Amino acid sequence: MATTKKTADYGDAQIKVLKGVEAIQRRPGMYTDLDSTNHMIGEVFDNSQDEALAGAASRIEVELFEDGAVAVEDDGRGIPTGFNKEEGVSTPELIFTHTHAGGKFGEADNRGAYGASGGLHGVGVKMTNALSLRLEVTIWRDGWEHALAFEHGKVVEPLKKKKSADPAKHGTRVKVWPDPKYFNGGFQLARFEHMLRSKAVLMHGVEVVWKRPDRDAVSWKFESDLGQFLTEELGEDSLTVAPVFQMEKDYEQDEGAFLRGEGFTLAVAFQEQGRGFRQSYVNLIPTKDGGQHEAGLKAGMYGAIKGVLDHMGLIPAKIKVEPEDVWARAAFVLSTKLIDPSFQNQTKDKMTSPKGKVLVEKLVRDNLELWLHDHPDHARAIGELIVSEAQRRQKSNLPVERRAGTGASVLPGKLTDCRSNDPSICELFLVEGDSAGGSTKEGRDKDRQAVLPLKGKIYNCWEVDSAEMMAHDEPRAIAVAIGVPPHMGKTAAEVDLSKLRYHSIIILSDADDDGLHIQSLLAAYFLRHYPALIEKGHIFVAQPPLFRVDAPAKKGSKEKEEKIYVQDQGALDRTLRELEKRNVPRDKILIQRFKGLGEMNAQELCDTTLEPSMRTLYRLVNEDAAVTEEAFNLMMVKKNSDSRRMWMEQDGNTVNSD
């Protein structure tokens, strides 16, 4: 029965107003990615980038310091330094502490200091300030140097000015010390450096400088077009069937639904070996989850290519070319500019403005169709590739049934299935080896847990298409067991997952180097051929314990001995310290290290890895598609052995193997 509260419990005093940056500090996850500090630093860079986009800056310098601070400096116009009478504070203080304050709110017919820009909500850099231990701002403008500083989002050193040592200097420098209490992880160097280089490509003629301790400074300044950049990213050995298609459209005056300054730049290549490099941007903001502009690109490419193939009679009878067949082979860079775009969230991972689809679709369709008609050899080569993809897709769409009407199972021979027909509660364990598979079968919940033992390390499926993947026993067995055909290059919205037989697919391997290798191969398998399952959160990695600690039971316990399972060396050290606090003699403690799952009996596997209330699972999530693609290409592509060796020597020690 609900308890009725008195009205005195809810009165005027309970109504609070969060001022300044307090709302951000109270709910930081609404404003930034808490898994790393990259986004909060990126917001500072985006302000400098907007100066470049407006034609006011030609150089942006980013520096990482040994204490974890990051500084971003540009040679733009410099933040205005006057006094805001309405709010009673200086303009720089207003910009860094008052949400929804900024210079990018110009109406469509009066765009103010900026046209197309990444800053839209007047929140970004306030979030950076709110979640920082300290933030320092230096501004050079009109022969003066201005400075102020904040701590925990509040001014601690008000705006002061002095004569600039260089009267001609202009621009803004922001130095940030992130507050670790708000974040689950730190600064991701490789991901951030990749972002800087990508932004430099899009800002033609703008120099981006990257400095970090104990390394030479890196400078990027691209005068070349996106086509050259895409070619470089794909690599010299990447097999493309035709030259890169490029186009650029910038509206120089308002025209119909589009405004002066809007448009896009595009480079597209078609690869023989599946999907390659893909990046999209809106106002130089990376949209890792795509959005309406990518939907327009997909529709435009399909319309153009399908029309030309029909005209040239290149589609065989009984073959139906679908948009996914075109999309699966495309590598591209798409940079879109819109005056007032909308995004799915504050981190701007996905662009939701329908205008973006309209902007890209028709122009791509018309221009690509003309290009194909003007280059019939290229059209034929691309057409043969697309038709080949359609044929592969149709071959790989194998129907899979859970059980036939007689009760017989049309499934891989080694699969030990569960009894339930409800996929929402069913789990499939992909287990390393027959030995561990036997213990897992014995210890599992037979109603809802299925087991598929794998023989050693599966085939590396990263570089092959789905048809070739299905020709190998272990990858094919997994595909048949889960009940969904491979769908390389498709999103969850494009795939029918209604026949997915298990909503939890769990990789279970030994906690050693071979086990990690198997995890990597299976991650590559799902990422390349089953991206929709990762997108929907169906793929997990189990972390079995590495140690078992046997110690005398606590006083009052009926058990004679306490068994403690711990995941790693750090957890073992903490457990031993806890036992020491309980005055448990060291000679009474027995430590067993599991070399593999096969050493655990069925009950131990059940207690530590199979029982949902006891086990540790990690969900596979593709947070940044471009960075993930780059990492897997480095680690999985055969031709990259020299690059792998160089990476291991230079940066291998910076990576957490998990």
Image (tube, grey):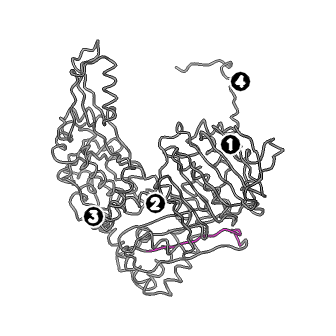
Q: Which residue is mark 3?
A: 469
Q: CA distance from mark 3 to mark 4?
A: 65 Å
Q: Nearer the viewer, residue 519 or 400?
A: 519
Q: Which residue is mark 4?
A: 13
Residues at marks 3 and 2 touching, judged by CB atoms closer than 8 Å: no
Amino acid identity at mark 2? Ala
Q: Residue at x 57, y 63 (%)?
A: 208
Residue 24 counted in the magenta span: no
| Image depth: mark 3 or mark 1 in front | 1
Q: Which residues are magenta?
A: 255-269
Tell me the tag on residue 328: none
| Image depth: mark 3 or mark 2 in front | 2
> Is residue 281 found left or right of 520 in the rendered image?
right
Q: CA distance from mark 1 to mark 4?
A: 33 Å
| Image depth: mark 2 or mark 1 in front | 1
**Secondary structure state at the residue bearing disc 4:** helix
Q: Position of residue 426 (x, y in %)?
A: 31, 43
Amino acid identity at mark 4? Ala
Q: Which residue is mark 2?
A: 626
Q: Position of residue 539 (x, y in %)?
A: 35, 48
Amino acid identity at mark 3? Met
**Secondary structure state at the residue bearing disc 3:** helix
Residues at marks 3 and 1 touching, judged by CB atoms closer than 8 Å: no
Question: Which corner quadrant of the image does residue 530 belong to?
Answer: bottom left
Q: CA distance from mark 2 to mark 1?
A: 35 Å
> Is residue 97 found left or right of 476 in the rendered image?
right
Q: Which residue is mark 1?
A: 149
